[in-house]
Image (cartoon, grey):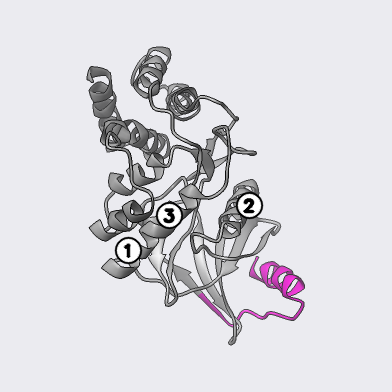
Amino acid sequence: MWQAISQQLSDTLLFEYQIKEKVRLSGGDISESYMINDGEQRYFVKINDRDFLAKFEVEAENLHLLRETSTLFVPEVVLVGKTKTHSFLILNYLPTKPLEDPKNSYKFGQRLAQLHLWGEQKEFGFDTDNYIGSTLQPNQWHKKWNVFFAEQRIGWQLQLLKEKGITLVDIDDFIDVVKQRLAHHTPEPSLLHGDLWNGNVALTPFDPICFDPACYWGDRECDIAMTELFGGFLPEFYQGYESVAPLPSDYAERKDIYNLYHILNHCNLFGGHYLEQAQSMIKEIISY
């Protein structure tokens, strides 16, 4: 496998790249991650089964798009490929550490706001479906945000659970509840990172960086809500964001609805206590 990766990387770089060092990196529940080094140039490599190739291709496309916005700092895609047994994604390598200092947290908040203000789009969705973790994320374009989110986010995840024999709520009834809760909220479509928890953000020697996107055009509050779901962001991050693009005063009323999507996805990926958490969130949303 590594010989094939080395050969394909050499073909891309137009010089012979011989892997002299290979270090397994921690983090990530889905793919294996490595740092490779030929003595001069280091690269970050993600590896998975061969049929994972489409997911790596979509991830690369999302990273390319985010780089085009000149807002968030994201890794540069070097190569997406496959061997006889595996698929892989190669990115430029940068040493990272947790984003824990106020100054850079503030800067990252500002840049996220700049992303959300970038570009113009009249509908919600994306040109292609992509993945949230390893779960397919449908992105069919829709003019109404409440319908898009209720059907393609909440309804989709509930249907995936139902196909596994898990029914948390009547799907059609709950889709209607979500539509009603969001009916009077009419945000402008913003390009979202889509999977913005603290594990997908870090600090490099140059700037804060983020990775593993699941981009689509949606309500910018979805990105902010997810940063609160698992914690890990300093107050300065939110201050930086607000300095560029203040949130609506009633944002908190929608936060749990948006975060339910990610909890349901965790139910589909991992099960366990996330099922109880999802059930609790659904009851609270219904009782509003």
Which disc number belongs to residue 61? Answer: 2
Q: Residue at x 64, y 69 (%)?
A: 2
Question: Is 14 contained in the magenta span?
Answer: yes
Q: Which residue is mark 3?
A: 112
- Of residues 280 and 50, the one nearer the viewer is 280
Taking the view exactly as shown, the residue that stands out farthest to the bottom is: 39
Residue span colored magenta: 1-22
> Taking the image as drawn, is residue 27 in sight?
no
- Choose the circle earlier in sequence order: 2 or 3: 2
- Choose the circle earlier in sequence order: 3 or 1: 1
x, y percent for residue 241: 35, 54
Q: Residue at x 46, y 54 (%)?
A: 114
Q: Where's the C terminus, which quadrant?
A: top left
Q: Which residue is mark 1?
A: 105
x, y percent for residue 170: 37, 14
Badge 1 amino acid: Ser
The number of numbered discs placed on residues in the rendered structure image is 3
> Taking the image as drawn, is residue 41 in sight?
yes
Residue 273, by quadrant, is top left
| Mark 1 neighbour class, 10 Å CA radius: few under 14, some 14 to 19, many 20 or more | many
| Mark 2 neighbour class, 10 Å CA radius: few under 14, some 14 to 19, many 20 or more | some
**Left or right: where 86 falls relative to 270:** right
- Of residues 98 and 46, the one nearer the viewer is 98
| Mark 3 neighbour class, 10 Å CA radius: few under 14, some 14 to 19, many 20 or more | many
Badge 2 amino acid: Glu
- Choose the circle earlier in sequence order: 1 or 2: 2
Q: Secondary structure at mark 1?
A: helix
